[in-house]
Amino acid sequence: DSGVTQTPKHLITATGQRVTLRCSPRSGDLSVYWYQQSLDQGLQFLIQYYNGEERAKGNILERFSAQQFPDLHSELNLSSLELGDSALYFCASSAQGGRGGYTFGSGTRLTVV
Amino acid sequence: DAKTTQPNSMESNEEEPVHLPCNHSTISGTDYIHWYRQLPSQGPEYVIHGLTSNVNNRMASLAIAEDRKSSTLILHRATLRDAAVYYCILRDVGGGTSYGKLTFGQGTILTVHP
């Protein structure tokens, strides 16, 4: 157990639907990062939150959004799902300043059918 | 983002040392060198990081060239559980636009033979 909890572990849904992925960071970590890993794209950075505020944005589609709540857990919302959104979605957290290592969760495997 | 270059794959025998190279010729003064590894169907796992000096921890050692344009991750005695994809990543802590995120490349696939 890395200390970063992601739920659900697996999700199967149909095209056009909307899903929410949840991440609880390691205790004490203020930063949360979301990554997408598909077979042909490798690990792609989506977005970062620090203490509730968006801090950095990567290649995140407009159909995707995220937020970090006062208790520091984060949610990634994926809407109007397409087959190409099928991937592993990882959440990571880091301490204030992030000069140390990042801790990743075990991921949510999303399958869009 | 400053870029890293790693060999696509490497092989090793069990209980032998492994030296995984990484080139980062465009590294800036505020870039930390991070190494992560990813086992099949798992999230990336932090291995080690450093700025200028060589670093050791229970998992590995990181040797950083004097000009910081390259680094080497050293696994002192490879085990079968070390078979994974190893990523060398530069992390900007200087407050620039890339601040915070880790940009993963393709990494090096390490195969460990019994």
Image (cartoon, coloured by chain):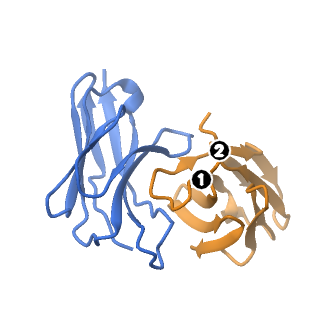
Amino acid type shown at disc 2: Val
Say which residue appears at 61% left-offset and 73% top-offset: A55
Q: Are marks 2 and 1 on the same chain?
A: yes
| Chain of the residue under label 2 | A
Q: Is any part of residue B32 visible from this angle?
A: yes
The foreground one among A13 and B87 is: B87
| Residues at circles 2 and 1 in contact by the CB criterion of under 8 Å | yes
B21 sits left or right of A79 in the view:
left
Secondary structure found at label 2: loop
Give the CA distance from mark 2 to mark 1. 7 Å
Answer with the quarter of the image where residue B84 lies: top left
Residue B24 appears at what percent x and percent y?
25, 64
Q: What residue is disc 1 on?
A: A92
Residue A25 appears at what percent x and percent y?
67, 49
Residue B35 appears at what percent x and percent y?
37, 49
- Mark 2: give few (<14), some (14-19) or many (20+) Cα within 10 Å: many
- Mark 1: give few (<14), some (14-19) or many (20+) Cα within 10 Å: many
Colour seen for chain A:
orange
Which chain is blue in the rendering? B
